[in-house]
Amino acid sequence: MNVITRYLIREHHIPLTATIIREFSQHLETSLHQQYMIPLSYLNIYRTRKEFKLMKSIQHRLQKGNYILRETDKSGIFHIGNSVDYEKKAEAYRQKTGAYIELDSNLLWSVFDKVILLLNDLRSKKYILPWQLDKMMPKRETVQLAYLYFIPNPHKAGTPLRPIVSSMSMQMTGISKFLDKLIRPIFDKHARSTTIINGVDLIHRLEAYTTNGYLKPKTYFCTFDITDLYTMLPQEESLDILIEFLVQHGYQKVQNIPIDIIRKLALTVIKENVFVYENKFYRQVIGGAMGSAFTLTLANIFMWKWQRQLVRRLEVSNEIYDRYVDDIFFTSNDSLESIDQMLDEANNFHSNIKLVRQIGRSVPFLDVLIQNSNGVLKTSVYHKEAAEPYVVPLGSDHPGHVFRNTVDTAITRAVRYSTTLSEFEEEIRQMKLMFLYNG
């Protein structure tokens, strides 16, 4: 309650003696008491015991069969895999990327002291304000060494693993979050023309492309994704591009922080990423931690520079070029040979950045299936082949609005994405089956 009270005072300027704080405290205490202190009903006791027994059974089977249970990448469902297979894939990933080096000891407090020293030095020289220092300063009593784990991506062949660094309590978390809030709005403002936020955004751009007469029967739709973008970011070069991006758009300071100081802070976030994995200590020497807030923004800015030549070439021909983090979509009225040659050249723009492409007159991108039907644009909802038909079960303990929102979101997406009645009806049929399957 003290934490909530301080938040209300700090963020909403409510006096400590205000009646509303006392009333809120009483309501919260009553609600918590009703939720946790009143005895459970017989049905809830029965359900709790049944689910506890089921959970212990799952744990026993996982241990007995040497299996590992992980939430999948993006889709939020669970995947069961063999522990030995997981470790082989994780080791292969580390060897392929060369992104991590093993350390002799735990550098938690060494890095912690570096961060404290840097922030205090910047404050003493008045490069940052007291409130900015407070946002970035790690707390000794809560800081923890980050740990690395891998999650599976069943949507891709062979179910590759994606590395995640648990960074909620690491030494640079405050700096990373601060830089993300500082820089991301600038990127969003100046890179909007080549960035999409969702499938609806892409469809709107395709509709404008069609209205302007650029969609022809010969038009190809092309997609490619960047392999291991976060892990393969060149660290020093990415920071140089960050400064180039800010300077090009007229920023010598951001919120009164000089850009060379921003680079110092970003360097700490990228370079001091140490963590534990399988009882061994590591440092990341290529890329940024997937799980750190600023890594996404830095990756976006790196791609802003990487894609520049490709964007210019396509803009001359009035083609679309759109990017969603590491997934890229563009249109072309050139021949397949010319498109392949262009992508081969793009594949050599940087040694760390490699592409996986798909070209055709019917391609999926994000959750949209895009088709060129003899010069007519058609779109519909796309479901990946490996996607599981799971949503929140109706019999779960979630509030009622969760189920309503799930249905509303699915219907709204079907309406927005479907260009024909038959496609809409097919999506509604799929939705009904999915909801029936989930009770």
Image (cartoon, helix red, strand yellow):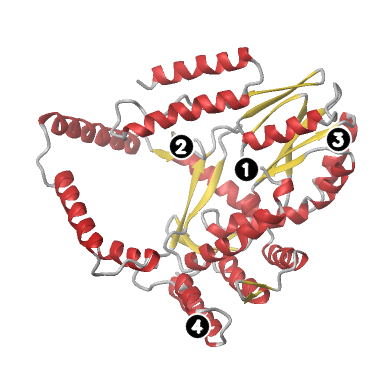
x and y percent of residue 327 in the render? Answer: 67, 41
Q: In the rendered view, would you say 66 is above or below 31?
A: above
> Is 45 positioned to the left or the right of 325 in the image?
left
The 10 Å Cα crowd at callout 4, few under 14, some 14 to 19, many 20 or more, is: some
Q: Quadrant of residue 66?
A: top left
Residues marked 3 and 1 touching at CB (< 8 Å)? no
Q: CA distance from mark 3 to mark 2?
A: 35 Å
Q: In the rendered view, would you say 256 is above or below 203?
A: below
x and y percent of residue 271 in the render? Answer: 59, 68
Where residue 120 is drawn, which disc sits there? 4
Amino acid under label 4? Asn
Q: CA distance from mark 4 to mark 1?
A: 38 Å
Where residue 339 is drawn, which disc sits there? 3
Under tag 2, what secondary structure? loop
Amino acid under label 3? Ile
The answer to which of 365 and 97 lies nearer the viewer is 365
Give the residue at x 28% y 36%.
60
Of the residues tagged 4 and 1, which is closer to the observer?
Answer: 1
Under tag 4, what secondary structure? helix
Precedes in sequence: disc 3 or disc 2: 2
Residue bearing mark 2: 76
Give the residue at x 10% y 43%.
38
Residues marked 3 and 2 touching at CB (< 8 Å)? no
Q: CA distance from mark 2 to mark 4?
A: 40 Å
Give the residue at x 50% y 47%.
150
Amino acid under label 1? Ile
